[in-house]
Image (cartoon, rainbow, N blue to C red):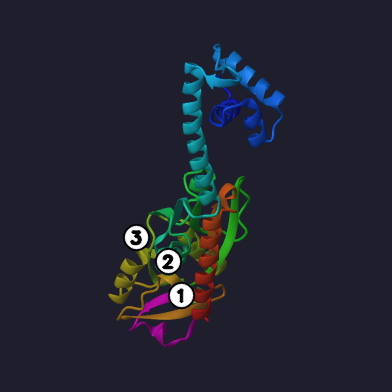
Amino acid sequence: MLDVRRMQVLRAVVTSGSITAAATNLGYTPSAVSQQVAALERQARTPLLERVGRGIRPTAAGRLLTEHAEIIGKHVAEAELALADLREGRTGHLSIRYFVTAGQALVPPALATLRAEHPGVQVDLKLVEPGPVPEVAQGEADVAICVLPPNPAPVPGVRFIHLLDDPYRLVLPRSHPLASRRVVELSELAEEPWVGNEWPPGQCVQVVLDACSSAGFSPGFVVESENYLCAQGFVAAGLGISLIPLLGVDRRPGVVVRKVRRPEPVRVIYAVVRESVAGQPAVRCLLDALATAAKAVAAGNR
């Protein structure tokens, strides 16, 4: 295999007209230049330079390698420039996974900031269930917004960044006897008909089930629905009550929203990041913007 560095030395000799001039331009000794050319001739298995009077000129093989060295030099320069752009966050590709309510409150402002500060970065944005940690761990995504248990177990190659604690709220029909209360004890809901709001069940439902278990009961679901908006429609129709994360509360006509306590269910939202990309400028920008959006949401929930 031909040595690219030696080809560049040959090119310097051919373009400057002599080994001595090439040595001066390259900062080498003439002996070192001669050795590099001789080694390249052994690799090429043919002479690359020939003497003409007191000077030298390339053979046909020497001209061929000089032309290719010029092409390679241009490609290397282009690669170095592209690498610098990627390293500085001016270009690149960022794969992001998010779930619906995070998409409503956290992702849009963060993505707008990313686009403003790193317009050359291509973004692959995909809607998934709230817990796609395996996609990040397997390298299929760079960043994912997830609902996870508090203090999740470590995963090799993955970093967890806490964004937001999202408390659940009780959504009641406006005519419900508990609608006049500002805060409702969770245990008071033991005998109520419940409207489910996540299908298939996942981490968000598990938060509710764990809280109800702590209050001494299991909720009796009479209606299953697959999202918070649909669940609130069933509640408005008087078919049951539902616990919905604050980010998912729509406050539509026909329902009231109340706090619950003892305990108050809370889902914990994280940014899950591949360690290998965590230091990239575009990723840092996205994470900072997500943190800023989460702080704004938390401040509005007080």
First in sequence: mark 1 or mark 3? 1
First in sequence: mark 2 or mark 3? 2
Relative horizontal placement of residue 248, taking residue 216 as reference (left or right): left
Pointer 2 and pointer 3: residues touching (CB < 8 Å)?
A: no
First in sequence: mark 1 or mark 2? 2
The image quadrant where one finds the N terminus is: top right
Q: CA distance from mark 1 to mark 3?
A: 17 Å
Expressed as whole percent of the image width and height from the top left, the position of residue 263 reads 56, 72
Residue pictured at 49% horizontal, 80% vertical: 300
Task: Name the amino acid type tagged 1.
Answer: Arg
Report the span colored magenta.
169-186
- In front of the other: label 2 or label 3? 2
Q: Nearer the viewer, residue 217 or 45?
A: 45
Q: Determine which residue is flagged by label 2.
A: 112
Q: Is residue 23 visible?
A: yes
- In front of the other: label 1 or label 2? 2
Residue 226, disc: 3
